[in-house]
Image: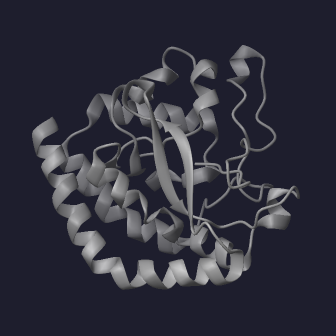
Amino acid sequence: MYPLKRALDLCLSVISLLAVLPLLALIGVLVSLTMGRPVVFRQTRPGLGGRPFVIYKFRTMRSGSESDAERLTKLGRFLRRLSLDELPELWNVLKGDMSLVGPRPLLMQYLERYTPEQARRHQVKPGITGWAQVKGRAAVAYEERFVLDVWYVDHNSVWLDLRIVLRTPFEVFRGRGVTAPGYATGPEFLGSRSQGRVHEGHGGASQSGERRRE
């Protein structure tokens, strides 16, 4: 399974990068003009087995100490709605940090908050899209999202990956589930309710001052 999946990742990511190069350049210029530099947001995320790697995304927020809602720009909101801010992650796929399909890489501090079952989501490489993303994206509560992630771990195959890849554009253009209801970006995962914790707040700050959900 792995060699075939890796070959599919490399083939599709190279084709996709070549196809969207003009779009990447345009977004880079627009981000630079509206938010300044750096154009690309970098943050350490957990990968396969929880091992850290640096993820790349287009910035969507201005730097500052204001809330996420105040710092999120109109361009950033547009990029997020169509998941265009995720395009630099194709480089992560080429490097082997990520796969095209897999559970979304969340924040490093979440690792110690998972139940043993939830932690199984790290038994495969994280992905740009995934089973949970085509089932509702960020509108799905964390516990349900992790159940979907673990289901993918147990059932992943090239054919399932192709099904998810083909379904992803449809879900993106529907524009549903870009953020959790009531949040500009997304809530922080503080642990499952069964552990006596709730979901609230925002993700941690990065070196560029941007707080990011998935």
Judge left or right: residue 139 versus residue 183.
Answer: left
Between 195 and 85, the one lying in front of the other is 85
Residue at position x 50%, y 14% from top?
A: 116
Query: Percent x, y for residue 75?
Result: 66, 79
Query: Percent x, y for residue 99?
Result: 31, 47
Identify the image's colour scheme: rainbow, by chain, secondary structure or one colour. one colour
Residue at position x 68%, y 74% from top?
A: 36
The answer to whether any part of residue 78 appears in the image is: yes
Query: Percent x, y for residue 91?
Result: 35, 58
Up/down of 92 relative to 203, above or below: below
Query: Percent x, y for residue 132?
Result: 47, 46
Between 12 and 175, the one lying in front of the other is 12
Up/down of 126 relative to 58, above or below: above
Between 85 and 143, the one lying in front of the other is 85
Q: How many marks?
A: 0
Up/down of 166 relative to 180, above or below: below
The answer to which image quadrant residue 176 occupies is bottom right
The answer to whether any part of residue 130 appears in the image is: no
Up/down of 3 relative to 196, above or below: below
Residue at position x 48%, y 18% from top?
A: 117
Single out the residue that lies furthest toward the right: 66
Judge left or right: residue 114 versus residue 55.
Answer: right
Which quadrant, please, contains the N terminus? Answer: top left
